[in-house]
Amino acid sequence: MGLLQLFLIVGLFCVASVLGFGIDPALRVSVFDELTLGDGYDGVTQVQGFHSESRAFHFQGSSREVRASVGVSERIVHKLRGKSEFTVLVTLKQELLNSGVILSIHHSEQRFLELESSGQRSEIRLHYRTKGQQPHTEVFPYSLADNQWHKVSVSVSASHVILHVDCNRIYERVVEIPYMDIPEDASFWLGQRNAAHGFFKGVMQDVEVLVMPQGYISQCPDLNRTCPTCNDFHGLVQKIMELQDILAKTSGKLSRAEEKMNGLDGCYCERTCSVKGVVYREDEGWTDGCRNCTCTNGTVHCEAISCPAPECPAGMAPAYVRDACCRECQPVCLFSSRELVEGDQRAVRDTSGRCLLFECKDRTMRRELPAALCPDPGCSEGDQIKLNDRCCTVCRGHDFCAEGHGCVENSECVNLEAGTRCVCKDGFSPMREDNAYCEDIDECAQGKHYCRENTMCVNTAGSFMCICHTGYIRIDDYSCTEHDECLSGMHNCDENALCFNMVGGHSCSCKPGYTGNGTVCKAMCDGLCQNGGTCVSPNNCICQQGFTGRRCETDIDECSDGFVVCDSKAICVNLPGWYHCECRDGYHDNGLFSANGASCVDINECKTGRNSCANDTVCFNLEGGYDCRCPHGHNCTGDCIHDNKVKHSGQIWVLESDRCSVCSCQAGQVMCRRMVCDCDNPGADLFCCPECDPRRSSQCLHQNGVLTYGSGDTWVDSCQQCQCLQGQVDCWPLSCPPVDCEFTAVAEGECCARCVTAPCQADSVRNDITKTCTDEHSSVPRFSGSSWVKHGTECTLCQCKVRAHTSAPHTHRHTHHMDTSPPPALPPSPPPTLRTHRTPSLPLPPPPKTKHTPPPTRLTLALPPSPPSPPSPHKHTSPPVTPTDQGQKLTWA
């Protein structure tokens, strides 16, 4: 199948997408329910949430330990282990400037899944481990720590990650695929990374993990999926490659099978019988106890052996031998005028009471030396009995069967006073006079049963059963009576059918006005019910909501009929079967999507740049629009408009919404910057300058638990830049320089990737899915980036690696042999930094080495087109999705 056909299939799959959406409870992890939050966790209290349909909890302080128990952690990890598609959902209100972990699944120092929100750097961070067992942090520039409610979802589908905030798609990127083979003893934390770091401060509600792609739909139902996920596509490609491999192997097997079938013409196939672990061929016979058996067409047939009376010569007599059914001639001995066969023993006591033991051997009674001392029988002398085949006495009730017996098939050993006897089991008759072999009695054939009318006798081993005839029910073990299924309700007739009882059963017939076979009857309507209506009774349609009429043919205009009253900021738009309150021009939805349009809010055209005001006029926002005005007395030059207020040229003021920012009006433009912090000034505002806080409570503990840092101090740990601000530690990945090459690798002990020339030495490759390699062993085309086991081997793994700008394919083989050749020389490595994926258009400043003062930033009333700023926490619009990289690590800003 060519690539064009593949993409056509994916396109058709995209068109025939899922129209409905439901969540299997087995795929949902409700974190609050799993942790039974509120039961004795210090620092966690239940409060009023964003809505009243579920519980919300306030996380405060730094002495709490919200950690799942071992059983709960194992249950959560079990659902996530090995999954390539999952979604993390949370509704939260985070305190200003707080940097904390929302949830974390880690084992020791390895973070397998962690979602973090940094208020100090206005970032959302997703920490995980890649398939190469490398730590990875995906950073999304966005501020959640604004003391406002936000709905947040992070959806991962293979290498595809989407961040939604307040039902707006903020970022969509292609990243390295997460490694989700989480150890069983991994720990699950909520609202903190561990007992000492990453404390989230604020309120959380509806914290869930959905083991499925596009789980944000449960949070925002209007964002239903329209196309397959990235994992769907990768799975489809992988399945095609597997089918190609299976086709090649199957073709070879069919060819070999045809060769073998050509030689089967002279073969004869026979059915065999298996009895007690032995396989017998067709018509093969054998003896089973007292029966002669034969294998016939795979079925065992047995008949009782007929034993003729043996004719024994002088000195021999007929006797039973172990493991033989019929009597056989055995040598005999005469003892006290009685004949004994070979092996029989007799005990004789002389006048002195001494016991002499004799045994029949070679037609002569030979004396045997008895045991030197008989064991104590364990009973009084009056309860002891003497036996004629041994010298030692035994107690009355002695278990002779336990010493061994000759009772074999369907026979039981019974103890007598001085020996044993064989008795046939119930339902069996003896096959010889000593009852050692017994056969089943066919009570049905011999009429020895108690089955009455309306029953059928069925023989069983040792017994029989009375089976009721069809249409009859059992009265007792031997009798049955006719069953009226219609009267008892035990029938399969439709509720709109008539039931007729019959001998041995019943019949069903649909009622007038209904059609069907009686078991399924549907109402007949004179014409089809339209627009999804259901025919529930003859000529009676039940219409779906929004339609009316005898055949549900008329759409209800909710807007004109007065059924709907939309908010003044919205207009009613009639739809087939429904309606919609659509925001008027100049308004947009705030993300709550109220049905009546109450969530429509004014668009500030001045701040969003959606205005046409010239430079000599000032944009003035109005409800539902804007106006370009000339400030009074200034001939439209010099003055500024800020927060709908006129600021004169040269005027300086502090922002009402942020006391740490100072703004000024300069030549008609508003210039804002953070307040300059002077830590030598004892009157410094610690709220705006947390790095100047000298209090002990504002100190931080290093990750190793030994070093202590003051507020404002910075340090580097595990390829991360960390900073302490007022007792809270915030760490972010060190910035790595861009690497523009096909093959990259991260050397041991380093943080950043560097270019390598050999594809087999690379950790990551820019895979171009439109390019393929040809498997030299099976001639099957393989997509770039795919791997497979070499045909005919078990220990050789092949991988297709194609350069992004060349057509020469490279096949990388991993074998069980150790490669001792030195690796190719690598170029000089840059300073250690962490391998992360950041939006290229938003570079981060270099990490400060000491207490820092943030540089002034220039804010204007209109959002600049580049670089893109994080969307406002209250009014969100989806940023443009444009690819900013090519190859495997494709990132969308």
Image (spheres, rainbow, N blue to C red):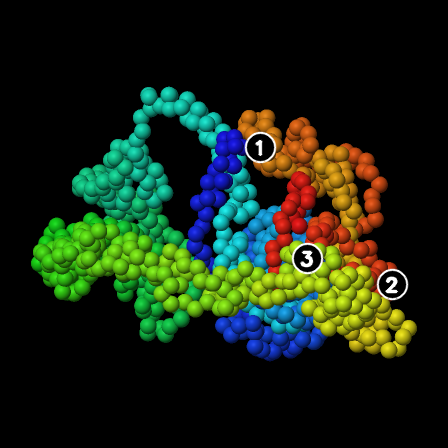
Upstream in the sequence, badge 2 or badge 3? 3
Q: Residues within 10 Å of mark 3 (few under 14, many from 20)?
A: some
Residue 318 at x, y percent in the picture:
23, 44
- Which residue in the structure is indicated by mark 3? 613
Disc 3 is placed on an element classified as: loop
Q: What amino acid is labelled 2 in the image?
A: Thr
Q: Is residue 195 left or right of residue 500?
A: right
Q: Between marks 2 and 1, how big is the CA–CA gap?
A: 53 Å
- Which residue in the structure is indicated by mark 2? 850
Query: Residue at left 60%, top 36%?
Result: 769
Q: Nearer the viewer, residue 43 or 893?
A: 893
Query: Residue at left 65%, top 34%?
Result: 801
Mark 2 and mark 1 residues within 8 Å of each other at the beta carbon: no
Residue 565 at x, y percent in the picture:
43, 68
Query: Residue at left 13%, top 65%?
Result: 487
The quadrant where residue 645 appears: bottom right
Q: Is residue 9 left or right of residue 748?
A: left
Q: Residues within 10 Å of mark 2 (few under 14, many from 20)?
A: few
Upstream in the sequence, badge 2 or badge 1? 1
